Structure formats: structure tokens, C-alpha cells
């Protein structure tokens, strides 16, 4: 497998102070919708993901001429704003747990400096896919990786592309 100049990245986004912000499925769905938008706009290709209650992992590849920093910033900002709007309307007491006294913001949903690692080979990419797909099993949320809905495991293990935006890392959709 030959990767283009820009390699896929394994990225971990952690909720501020590991709080369980993403426990409601509607916030997981928001992340999925945002990823679908980025794929349709040809900003990224998504090879794998898992969304847990307090963090999520992605394996994605930024598409030229876009830059990882800009795509990641815009993606996280949009998701945070949509969650904030929902919390204001429906769960104002929860929003208080994310208030901060910072110069540039009043709320913080994501831990700063998300972990992002370039994946230079298909072996490393496969290892990261296995790792993220095992997250829900290790957390006791399911018996098998493919049983957890908010994951790309079924795409790889059962050939089901329920989300419509996943690309197989070796070239197939």
C-alpha cells in the first residue's frame, strides 16, 4: 500500500477533564454527521473511528489542499458549538460543568492539544484500528467490537458501511 505524501493520522480527542459529555447518543450522532460533512466536502477520508462517552478516536486523512490543523480546529469548534447550543436549551445545569475562566472562552469541551500521530504504514494503521475497535469491549460496553454502534468495527469485520462515509484503508469504500 502506498500512502500519498500526507499520511493518515490517528487522533484522540478527549473531553475536558475526562467528563462524560458524549454519553448522550445525540452528541455521538453530531460527531458522525460532522464527519460525514467533512467527507462530502472532500476535506477528509475517514478510515476508522470509535466514539466513547469521554473521548473519541479517529483515523483520517486530510485531503489536499486542506491542512490538518484547520480541519481539526473547525471540526472540533463546530461540534462544541452545537453541543453548547443544545446544553443551553436543554441541559443548562450540565453546561456549568464546562465553564472556565479563560481569556478566549467561557466554556471548554475538549482537552487542549489533541494527540495526533501520522501513520506511515498499513501495519501501524491496522494496529490502531484494532486498538480503537477494542475500546468499547475493554470498557465493558459490549462483548465484541462489532456490537458497539458508534464504531467502524462493523465496516471492517462485517463489511457494513452503515455510516456511508467510511473508506477502507486499502482503497475500498
Image (cartoon, helix red, strand yellow):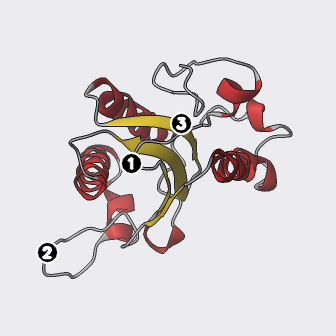
Q: Judge the density around disc 2: few (<14), some (14-19), many (≥20) Cα neighbours within 10 Å.
A: few
Q: Position of residue 85 (x, y in %)?
A: 23, 46
**Dot in front, 1 or 3:** 1
Lateral position of residue 155 relative to residue 94, left or right: right
User: Which residue has dot 3 on it?
Assistant: 47
The CA distance from mark 1 to mark 2 is 34 Å
Lateral position of residue 144 relative to residue 104, left or right: right
Q: Residue at x 14, y 75 (%)?
A: 104
* For residue 136, above or below residue 115: above
In the picture as drawn, the residue positioned furthest to the front comes out as 2
Q: Position of residue 160 (x, y in %)?
A: 65, 17
Q: Residue at x 35, y 29 (%)?
A: 39
In the picture as drawn, the residue positioned furthest to the right comes out as 143
The CA distance from mark 2 to mark 3 is 33 Å
Q: Judge the density around disc 1: few (<14), some (14-19), many (≥20) Cα neighbours within 10 Å.
A: few
User: Which residue has dot 1 on it?
Assistant: 5
Counting residues from the start of the chain, the first of labels 1 and 3 encountered is 1
Q: Nearer the viewer, residue 42 or 163?
A: 42
Q: Nearer the viewer, residue 86 or 165?
A: 165
Q: Position of residue 172 (x, y in %)?
A: 56, 20
Q: Quadrant of the N terminus?
A: top right
Q: Position of residue 162 (x, y in %)?
A: 57, 18
Kindly state the secondary structure of the residue where label 1 is placed.
Answer: loop
Q: Nearer the viewer, residue 4 or 52?
A: 4
* For residue 69, above or below residue 16: above
In the picture as drawn, the residue positioned furthest to the left comes out as 103
Counting residues from the start of the chain, the first of labels 2 and 3 encountered is 3
User: Which residue has dot 2 on it?
Assistant: 104
Amino acid at each position: 500500500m502506498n500512502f500519498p505524501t500526507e499520511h493518515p493520522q490517528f487522533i484522540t480527542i478527549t473531553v475536558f477533564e475526562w467528563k462524560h459529555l458524549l454519553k448522550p447518543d445525540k452528541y455521538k450522532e453530531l460527531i458522525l454527521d460532522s464527519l460525514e460533512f467533512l467527507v462530502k466536502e472532500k476535506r477528509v477520508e475517514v478510515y476508522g473511528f470509535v466514539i466513547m462517552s469521554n473521548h473519541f478516536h479517529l483515523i483520517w486523512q486530510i485531503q489536499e489542499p486542506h491542512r490538518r490543523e484547520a480541519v481539526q480546529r473547525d471540526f472540533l469548534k463546530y461540534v462544541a458549538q452545537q453541543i453548547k447550543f443544545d446544553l443551553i436549551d436543554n441541559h443548562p445545569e450540565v453546561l456549568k460543568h464546562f465553564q472556565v475562566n479563560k481569556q478566549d472562552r467561557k466554556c471548554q469541551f475538549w482537552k487542549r492539544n489533541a494527540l495526533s500521530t501520522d501513520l506511515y504504514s498499513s501495519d501501524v494503521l491496522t494496529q490502531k484500528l484494532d486498538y480503537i475497535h477494542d475500546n468499547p469491549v475493554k470498557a465493558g460496553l459490549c462483548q465484541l467490537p462489532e456490537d458497539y454502534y458508534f464504531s467502524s468495527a462493523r465496516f471492517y469485520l462485517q463489511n457494513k458501511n452503515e455510516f456511508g462515509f467510511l473508506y477502507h484503508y486499502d482503497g475500498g469504500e
